[in-house]
Amino acid sequence: MKLFLSTIFLFSILIIPSLKAEDTPNNFDDLKVLFIGNSLTSYNDMPEMFKQLAIASGRDVRVGKAFHPGKALYELRYNVDVHDSINAEQWDYVVLQSSDYYAFEEFYDLEKMTLSQFREMILENCSTSKIIYPMIWAVRDGYSYQMDGQTYTVSYEDHYNLIYETIFPFMYDNEPLIIAPVATTWNSVIEDDNEAKFDLYAKDRAHPAWNGSYLMACVMYSTVYFENESNIDYFAGLNQDTAYYYQERARSIVLNDLSLWNINYDYTAIDEEYSEQSGFLLYQNNPNPFS
């Protein structure tokens, strides 16, 4: 097992153009987004939360779902329902939700091959589809597993660090893969207040609780629309302060470095008279994927 880099927090100045839908090359008012995965995404109907965030911000988005609880992403490569869902529309975005264990060395090659096969299927159906790969959060209390007769223990912190540093090679090998930094946002919330983990995780300590699904929806929203906009008045039953906090944290993690997550758009399409927002934000930059 490789050595893990410790978590490093640093302050950085965030300067982000205030974008509007009409300023960008995509038609953000009418997007089609397909979610493929298992119960980590289907829990609490996270895609519906994502949709309601978009609607509350004045957009119309059509959401497709191809969920198979208990199945890993590699098991869905030849699933008829998944293939039919991909071919049903000219999707603007296809979200490929994997699992938290993809980062372990034993699964690396399989995951890489799986993403390559999905990429081929998706782009064959629609060459302009953008593929999003959510960075799934670490298990709340870490892992204990056996290998070659020995028991190994991986803490939450080590599991998160491994997830973070492993995901970037997947992105580089499967362009134009986009990372939705769910785990980084999730970890940032826990770093703010360690007790927050009890709000984010379901009782099994792996699936998302209602708060966790809403936080994931906020990250997905910021990844798709990448806009530095005001708070959105859709709370999914959470209190307003909590919902706004999750929205802000998702925005800050996603927008602080769009290029890191491979979220690209054409700055030349933005009017020169844009406004700049500056401020100090707590930004997580660990581990350095380029080390």
Image: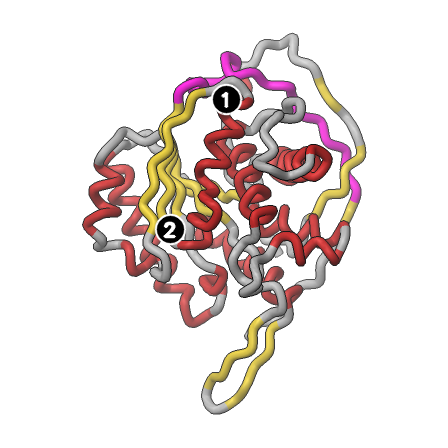
Q: Position of residue 22 (x, y in %)?
A: 50, 12
Nearer the observer: mark 1 or 2; the answer is: 2
Residue 127 part of the magenta-drawn span:
no
| Residue in view at x 53 percent, y 29 percent | 53
Residue 27 part of the magenta-drawn span:
yes
Q: Which residue is mark 1?
A: 266
Q: Position of residue 34 (x, y in %)?
A: 35, 37
Q: Amino acid at mark 1?
A: Asp
Q: Secondary structure at mark 2?
A: strand
- Disc 2 crowd rating (10 Å Cα; few below 14, some 14-19, many 20+) is many
Q: Secondary structure at mark 1?
A: loop
Using the image, tell me which numbered label, if any, was put on residue 37.
2
In the image, is residue 210 above or below residue 272? Answer: below
- Disc 1 crowd rating (10 Å Cα; few below 14, some 14-19, many 20+) is few
Q: Quadrant of the C terminus?
A: bottom right
In the image, is residue 167 above or below residue 280? Answer: below
Q: Position of residue 78 (x, y in %)?
A: 21, 55
| Residue in view at x 71 percent, y 19 percent | 276
Q: Position of residue 74 (x, y in %)?
A: 32, 59
In the image, is residue 151 above or below residue 186? Answer: below
Q: Quadrant of the N terminus?
A: bottom right
Q: Amino acid at mark 2?
A: Gly
Left or right: 11 as drawn, with respect to 284: right
| Residue in view at x 33 percent, y 29 percent | 128
Q: Marks 1/2: CA distance? A: 30 Å
